[in-house]
Image (tube, rainbow, N blue to C red):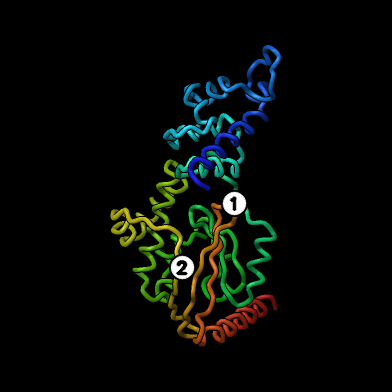
Amino acid sequence: MDDKQRRRELGDFLKTRRARLSPNNVGLPEGTRRRTPGLRREELAGLANVGLTWYTWLEQGRDIQVSAQVIESIARALQLSPDERTHLFALARCEIPAAPYLLEETVSPALQDILDSLGTSPALIRGRRLDVLAWNQAACAVFLDYASMPPDERNSLWIMFTNPAIRQMLGDWEGHAQRLLAKFRAMCDRYAGDYRFTQLVEKLHAVSPEFCQWWQKHDVQGRSAGCKEYEHPAVGQLLLNHTTLQVSHNPELEVVVYTPLPDSDTLRKLQQLRDLHRLEKFLLKS
């Protein structure tokens, strides 16, 4: 849509969200009879702590500058859902900040089924702090037995910097570790003030000289894709493409999938590792 149409859509969206709120919803008296449903403009502007004239222009689709802070105030006053908040920021052409109400990091049975359906391709689901929340058996066969790890150590950044087996397996460990750290740094800045990020940073400072050195660089990076080379102690070289996907209904979750590089023998080796893992589990149970 062109800019004029976008501003008109923004105004219409604000009007419809305002119309669904009654004074009782926001702790205001009903007052005199209202000609139209919902809050008055002056009531909404007061709740959002923005000027009435400015807010009126916004609903009218005027060509005015909008800050993310003001849009956030309006979103709170309108009691928008996470999806509505995202839509409002998109219409206002503002970069969306971290949600003040963080979604719970839970993995649905349907998402777990997707992981399990990937066969020999290792796959993980990670949260905003790079905590490993779910995995399939292929990931356990290739990387680590996540189920046997303490929950507070089940974190991709912690594993990268403290697990010697992963360091030995991963070709160009330094490059991959720095890129993962840059991704974490971007999320850490996005959720500034979240004590769980601070705790992880302090723990890694205490155990990893590389983390201490690279943390000072302040490098940042978003989601990435590419190829990783592993030297697995059981089957030798593995060439894996890794792709990161966002969960639409909870965008703070990401699905990381590793697939064998075409024209390599990695698929056969992944099948071998799957069979070895099944055998180990059988022997442990017997």
Marker disc for residue 225: 2
Residue 112 point in image, percent of width and height: 66, 63
Residue at mark 1 to residue at mark 2: CA–CA distance: 20 Å
Most foreground residue, 284 or 114 = 114
Q: Amino acid at mark 1?
A: Asn
Question: Which label belongs to residue 250?
Answer: 1
Return the x and y of residue 141 as percentages of the image width and height: 57, 76
Q: Position of residue 173 (x, y in %)?
A: 37, 71
Q: Earlier in the sequence, mark 1 or mark 2?
A: 2
Can you see residue 276?
Answer: yes
- Secondary structure beneath dot 1 equals loop
| Quadrant assignment, res 169 | bottom left
Dividing the picture into quadrants, the one containing residue 255 is bottom right
Crowding at label 2, few (<14), some or many (≥20) Cα neighbours within 10 Å?
few
Q: In the rendered image of this protein, does residue 279 appear above or below residue 91?
A: below
> In the image, what residue type sits under mark 2?
Ala
Would you say the residues marked 1 and 2 are in contact, meaning their CB atoms lie under 8 Å apart?
A: no
The answer to which of 178 and 244 lies nearer the viewer is 244
**Which corner quadrant holds the C terminus?**
bottom right
